[in-house]
Amino acid sequence: MEKLFKLKEHNTTVKTEVMAGITTFLTMAYILAVNPNLLSASGMDSGAVFTATALASALATFIMAFWANYPIALSAGMGLNAYFAFTVCLGDLKGIEDPWKVALAAVLVEGIIFIVLSFFKLRESIVNAIPANLKYGITAGIGLFIAFIGLQGSGIVIADGSTLLALGDFSSPEVALCLIGVLIIAVMNHYNVKGSILWGILITWGLGIIAELTGWYVVDPEAGAFSLIPSFSASSFIPPSIAPTFFQFDFAWIASNISQFIVIVFSFLFVDMFDTIGTVIGVADKANLLDKDGKLPRVGRVLMADAVGTVAGSMLGTSTITSFVESSSGVAEGGKTGLTAMTTGLLFIVALFLSPIFLAIPSFATAPALIIVGFFMASSIKKMHFDGDVADAVGGYLAFLMMPLTYSIANGIMFGMLAWFLIKICTGQIKKIHPVMYIVCALFIFRVVTLII
């Protein structure tokens, strides 16, 4: 352990690192329930997605542990999975057969591009060129979008012919239990309970089982209300087959729709790019791993773990793999080296054999996690400056406003970026526009043109 992770150099012990790894896993294990739930909306097999998520998370986290030697764990990114399912599959690609196969191809291409960008150290340069207000606005917008999906999935917010949206039926067990779940997670978070999101999901699910046994929650498969009680058998603990999603790419559609595909890939790229950088720097800062100039040593290896994980995840059958901010919980417990990440990766492997539990959790039990994670991400809005440069302020504002209102992360980024770009030009600040932003905005202008045509 000393040779692999240099524990003495980092002033830590095996026990501390292992406990930190367990803590990190508990705080991010909810993704094993949330990701299959979200991606199944696009038509993917939830069992295969569960297995793909666990395997890709373990692989990427092991790369982080053994190559970069940092206490950072990775899994399918929140926001990116919502973009995958609801914006790409149910929006941009709606109407085509198996749209998730095209989306997986986009994730594959994104991952390959990231490997190239990371290898030539271009990734950090691109992120640094994006104005801070736009970064914060996009992060906040993704938070609102995720929360909206949770509110919609649990029935708290429903469609309305007159006002577009309305409150759902509060006598519904799904609505009531979701709200209770949000309250549970919020209270646990206040008391710094480790794994509060996971515990909130499990308790909400447990209350749902009680509701089913007492007759309040009525099982009606035709209406989408399935039994909440998992069935256990010797065979059920064998990890679900990954065959339905393994190497399931659709390149035929791409050949005749290359412009639309480029925009999809770019949106994946953009969100993942600054999300990873921000998470990694934030976690590293909390662990006192940054150097005197505020830079992270071996950052290239960190980004490469993310990129390789994304490529592997697409091949296995899951959305973009990225560094998890929940890694900070393990750091708070004293984790400083890759041994923390290795422990988390091993627990993802163990979780493979607990699929009956994770796959039986209903959407109204995972919805509180989406709402609370959305809250954490939306809090980035407090870092925005609304009284400074008007281009920065309006661009960031439109980014977080348009994501939930157009039900698309890509649209939010597009509105924010183009507004920033055009206002900069109209206010005589052309010289302040970084060359990278010209390329970014040109891509979005191209997308607008294709939408008009």
Image (cartoon, rainbow, N blue to C red):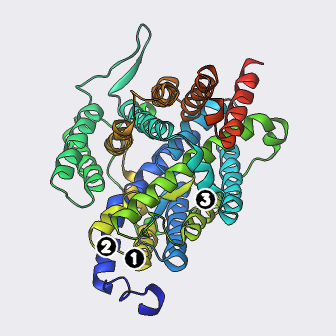
CA gap, disc 3 and disc 1: 20 Å
Task: Look at the numbered disc 1 and give the secondary structure of its residue.
Answer: helix
Q: Quadrant of the N terminus?
A: bottom left
**Crowd rating for badge 3 (residues with CA inside 10 Å; few <14, some 14–19, many 20+):** many
Residue 26 is situated, as x and y percent measured from the top left of the image, at 32, 63
**Element at label 3:** helix
Specify the amino acid type for callout 1.
Thr
Q: Position of residue 452 (x, y in %)?
A: 73, 18
- x, y percentage for residue 113? 71, 55
Q: Earlier in the sequence, mark 2 or mark 3?
A: 2
Residue located at (75% from left, 23% from top): 449
Instruction: Give me the disc on residue 20.
Output: 2
On the question of residue 125 being in view, the answer is yes
Can residue 45 be seen here? The reply is no
Query: What is the residue that sits farthest to the right in this orientation?
Result: 256
Label 1 with label 2: CB-CB less than 8 Å: yes
Comes first in the chain, label 3 or label 1: 3
Image mark count: 3
Out of 213 and 449, give the one closest to the viewer.
449
Name which quarter of the figure residue 359 lies in.
Answer: bottom left
Q: Which residue is mark 3?
A: 310
Sequence-first tag of 1 and 2: 2
Name the foreground residue: 72 vs 107.
Answer: 72
* Residue under label 1: 343
Q: Residues within 10 Å of mark 2 (few under 14, many from 20)?
A: many
